[in-house]
Image (tube, rainbow, N blue to C red):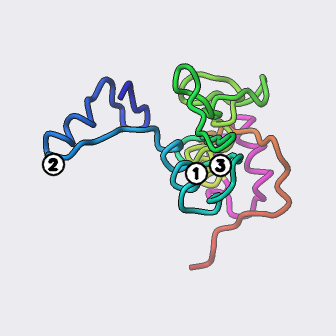
Amino acid sequence: MRHSPFLGWREVPLAGLVTAATGLPAVLENDVRALTAAVHWFGAAAGRGTFALVTIGEGLGCGIVVDDRLLVGTAGVSGQIGHLAIDDRGPICERGHRGCARAYLASPSIRRTARAALDRPSLTFEQALDLARRGDPVARRSSTRPAWRWAGSWRRSPT
């Protein structure tokens, strides 16, 4: 494994450690590509020769199958869409990229934006985003600026 930014790992020989611990051969693969292969073999894309699978979570990823072959790219980074530029005036992600998809869509960004909206229960989601953009002390934890329009509102439940 070269690195795992979500776990903070660099140069961890995980496959070798698993083999040593279990006595079984182990292969290590990117999580999105592994999921894409599983969906291709056993899931919703079984029998389809060409498709794309997009994941949104702690990061953003895209697995791509063309002519029944999983694309990996020359450097093994095909489908890594998290830092795809969306808005050059947008928020900065944790790796310093301005306005990338991850800054808008990944779980940490969604959590920050929702937290800001919940801190002011009378605000709509859009109002909380606007306050966050302007540096409001309560909403500043959310530096996201949406690339979409949210029609609803988020309010704290009365529980």
* Crowd tier of the residue under label 3, counting other residues whose Cα lies within 10 Å: few below 14, some 14–19, many 20 or above: some
**Up/down of 134 relative to 131, above or below:** above
Residue occupied by mark 3? 53
- CA gap between label 3 and label 2 equals 31 Å
Q: Residue at x 58, y 51 (%)?
A: 111
Q: Amino acid at mark 1?
A: Arg
In-front residue for pair 103/120: 103
Secondary structure under tag 3 reads strand
Question: Which amino acid type is marked by label 2?
Answer: Thr
- Residue type pointed to by label 3: Leu
- Residue for point 69% across, 46% down: 52
Look at the numbered discs 3 and 2 and tell me whether their residues touch, using CB distance below 8 Å: no
How far is the residue under mark 1 from the one under mark 2?
38 Å
- Please give the residue where the numbered disc 2 appears in the rendered image: 22
Q: Position of residue 12 (x, y in %)?
A: 27, 29
Comes first in the chain, label 3 or label 1: 3
Q: Earlier in the sequence, mark 3 or mark 2?
A: 2
Q: Residue at x 65, y 40 (%)?
A: 64
